[in-house]
Amino acid sequence: MSNPSPTELHSFIARAKAATYVGDGAKIPSCRPASHDLQFVDGDWSYLDSYFGGTDFIGEETIWHAGKPVWCMNYYGYILKPELITPAQAGQMIKASLSRMYTENRFLGGFQHSEGDFVYFDTSEGEFSRFTGREWIERDGIKAYELVYHGGLIKD
């Protein structure tokens, strides 16, 4: 089977991300002890988001095409100022912000979204084939939550 085109891969990543965490997709049984796992499958494409933790969390998103891993992203997020944002507020703001980003068929930086006194930011360097980035939420101009991420194509 031929390799997927970059356009097909990019489109699938955005759809999978929108359908899982942001879209409140159903969790699947843990693939590792104590992990939280979300899966999205569409034809030859498969996506798995597997993470640990809650308030502070770490995880990995992997895309397979025809059973072969082709793309991956790692992330680590944490509450910096629990007096300014609760985990529930951070999760709500992240979902609202990423939902807007994914409707633009994209998932990397250069994005800002405001709701109430929270402002979400996402910045990144590189393209989806190789990237690093950071998202954060500010409340009243103070950074209260942060997540760092990196990833890209997997090649044999």
Image: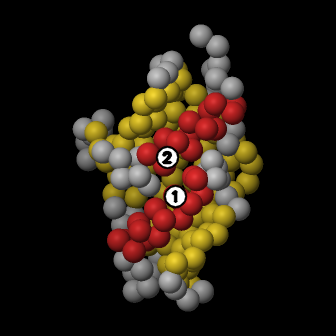
Which disc number belongs to residue 17?
2
On the question of residue 112 being in view, the answer is yes
Q: Is residue 122 above or below residue 43?
A: below
- Observer-nearest residue: 25 or 56? 25
On the question of residue 60 being in view, the answer is no
| Residue at image point 64% right, 23% down | 4
Q: Is residue 17 left or right of residue 11?
A: left
Q: Which image quadrant: the C terminus?
A: top right
Compare marks 1 and 2 and give the one earlier in the sequence: 2
Q: Nearer the viewer, mark 1 or mark 2?
A: 1
Q: Where is residue 11 in the image (x, y as percent from the top left)?
A: 61, 38
Q: Is residue 149 above or below residue 145?
A: above
Question: Residue under circle 1?
Answer: 99
Which disc number belongs to residue 87?
none
| Residue at image point 60% right, 71% down | 113
Residue 137: image quadrant is: bottom right
| Residue at image point 64% right, 69% down | 112
Q: Is residue 40 above or below residue 76?
A: above
Residue type indicated by callout 1: Ser
Distance between the Cα atoms at labels 1 and 2?
9 Å
Q: Which image quadrant: the N terminus?
A: top right
Q: Is residue 117 above or below residue 151?
A: below
Residue 10: image quadrant is: top right
**Badge 1 density bin: few <14, some 14–19, many ≥20, Cα 10 Å:** some
